[in-house]
Image: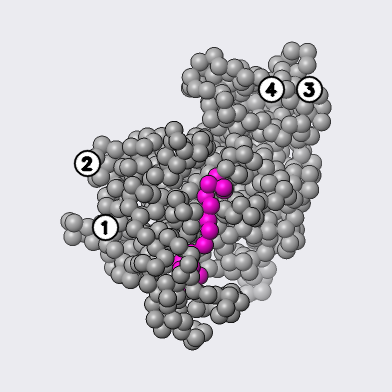
Amino acid sequence: MNKFCYILLISCFTQLVCAQPVQIQIDVLANRKPVSPYLYGRNNSLSADPGKPVSADNWLRYKDAGLRFLRENGGNNASKYNWRRKLSSHPDWYNNVYTNDWDFAAASLLTNLPGTQGMWAFQLLGKAAKTNSNNFNDWGYNQSKWWQGVNQNLAGGGTVNPDINSTKALKEGNPDQYLENWPADSTVGILDHWFGAKGLGFDKARIRYWSMDNEAEIWSGTHDDVMATQLSAEEFIQRYVAVALKARAKDPSIKLVGPATANEWQWYNYDNKPVTGADGKKYPWLEFFVKRIAEEQKRTGVRLLDVLDIHFYPGSSKSAEVVQMHRVFFDRNYVFPEANGIRTSTGGWDTSLNKEYIMGRCRDWLTQYMGPTHGVGLGLSEVGLNSANDANTHAVWYASTLGDFMNNQVELFTPWSWQPGMWEVLHLFSRYNLGTSVDAISTNEELVSAYATTNQTNDSLTVALVNRSATETKTVTLTIKNRSFPNQTPTLLLLASLPATETFVSHTSNALKKNVASLLNNTLTVSLPPMSVGSLQLVGQPASSAVVTGLEPVSLTDVSIFPNPTSDVFQLTTTARCRCTVYDISGRIIQSFETPTSQSFGHGWPAGTYVAVLKTHGQQTRAFRLVKQ
């Protein structure tokens, strides 16, 4: 065979394979896992300035997009926060001190976003903002414009270095002029201030998660005004434990989140190197952290960690790489193009190490050092992508990461940078996804994935779909096992060809398009355009074998069903696990399901008035009048 014919044959074979439909098999009884509502999160959504409250348009966007978890500590700005004075020191702006009112931010969350959870932080650095009277006059210097010198330590009487490339002042400012000591008792005092008998009366059930400061392994860089030399990893552990013990003593139900490592390099390196333990062995930083916290828990008899938290800031602007980056967390076969810190994980420098699966590693370490019933969740509280990527790339990456986290029981996810396309995906997933992840296996997982969710009674199924191909429309055939959905013409809600500017305004003003999917013999066929995200919803009758279990005798005082009225679906959020039964106006049962903390329902209901009755195991009951327009 000549070379031309061989190449032509290979090309034809490749085109034939690519043209084959992607087969996806969904089994609603296989691999069932609860989906955390706190995956639908974000950083920096609230205002901490009473003079600049969140706008009505943004409150509407947050509610309609289905935002459920808000991390509002400000990252690096949390380390020197003073809740008594309502001040913070900005490490990336001359260390200047500015007004930062967490009280105002928390109150606005509790008032305007029912059913959501907020996360703030404890300070472990040991210093907090004292006064803004010794700030560097940034306005007088250059009208407060950004330049490389904003990283110079000029607050407290420093002398500016005019070299545009220098981050070091000619004379360092004196931190004693703008900071004060901030021991463990001071930082955990915010719990009394917010929730105590003489405090502000905030609902602690809505602010259960507390970050244990932020990116401590690089404090000698971010907070070099007070830490010119990095404290050792063991010294940080001692600070962590001291604060954790005092916080847990004040509120046993608190959720402690840490250590919030800065990026891939810092997953493995503390102060730019692996940690040498007391046994002389070199450990990746996160392994050492887990090991030492496990030892301290055993020593004290107190739980010191609830969510193991990391950050991630990849640098690639290549779309084909970005849309695969969701695989860095659990995929043990994924070769990460930016692998770096992982190469130090065995104590040396091994260039053959490039498979991260960092959350998988963390889960392995938690099991190794704390045992199989450790109960520690996983979180990604900061992530940012290169802004050079387009809205479709961001949407596909975000949807893929959400889907992977749903499948792997990640507890919280709050991206730091927020790009066009992400509001659209948040709305699509938070509003339509259900509470239990089930198996959805694709024959071409690299390019096409399905993320399937159902409810406890299997009477509803949502399938989120992602096509990562930049050039090819993919025909997808989905086969559903162990559940029938007869007599339906499902609608495919689709995000594709998104423009560069933000398109999401509200539930009624966004970029979603509706397409029709065909359903025959429990098999669906849909067409996914290049770089697209879609969602299919199916509704049937409750499965006869469904059993209600695990209901808790807790209060139904914190319950919300919104939007109401709606032309689409209702979203139920509650702190109590309960049974929800919905009746039409004639008293006929329309739907009945067991709900965790968050559940969407009402798919495909005709317009009319309904009554939802919620009941806990302890027989506490609440009823809601619902209107479907």
Please state which amino acid type lies under the numbered disc 1: Glu
Amino acid at the residue labelled 3: Thr
Label 1: which secondary element: helix
Q: What is the spatial separation of the Cα atoms under label 1 and label 3, in whole angstroms?
A: 61 Å
**Residue 59 position in % (x across, y down):** 68, 46
Q: Secondary structure at mark 4?
A: strand
- Measured in 3D between alpha carbons, the distance from the residue under mark 1 to the one under mark 4, in whole angstroms, is 53 Å
Between the residue at mark 4 and the residue at mark 3, the CA separation in whole angstroms equals 11 Å
- Estimate the x, y position of residue 375 in percent, counting from the top left: 38, 37
Q: Nearer the viewer, mark 4 or mark 3?
A: 4
Q: Amino acid at mark 2?
A: Arg
Kindly identify which residue carries mark 1.
235
Distance of mark 2 from mark 3, alpha carbons? 57 Å
Who's the residue at 73% across and 62% down the image?
A: 501
Q: Given contact means CB atoms under 8 Å apart, are the residues at marks 2 and 3 in contact?
A: no
Residue 290 vs 459, above or below: the answer is: below
Which residue is drawn at the image coordinates 42% and 65% (left, top)? 178
Q: Identify residue type, mark 4.
A: Phe
Q: Residue at x 32, y 42 (%)?
A: 246
Seen from the viewer's position, the closer of residues 146 and 467 is 146
| Structural crowding at the residue carrying mark 4, measured as other residues with C-alpha within 10 Å and reported as few (<14), some (14–19) or many (≥20) | some
Measured in 3D between alpha carbons, the distance from the residue under mark 2 to the one under mark 1, in whole angstroms, is 17 Å
Q: Is residue 437 visible?
A: yes
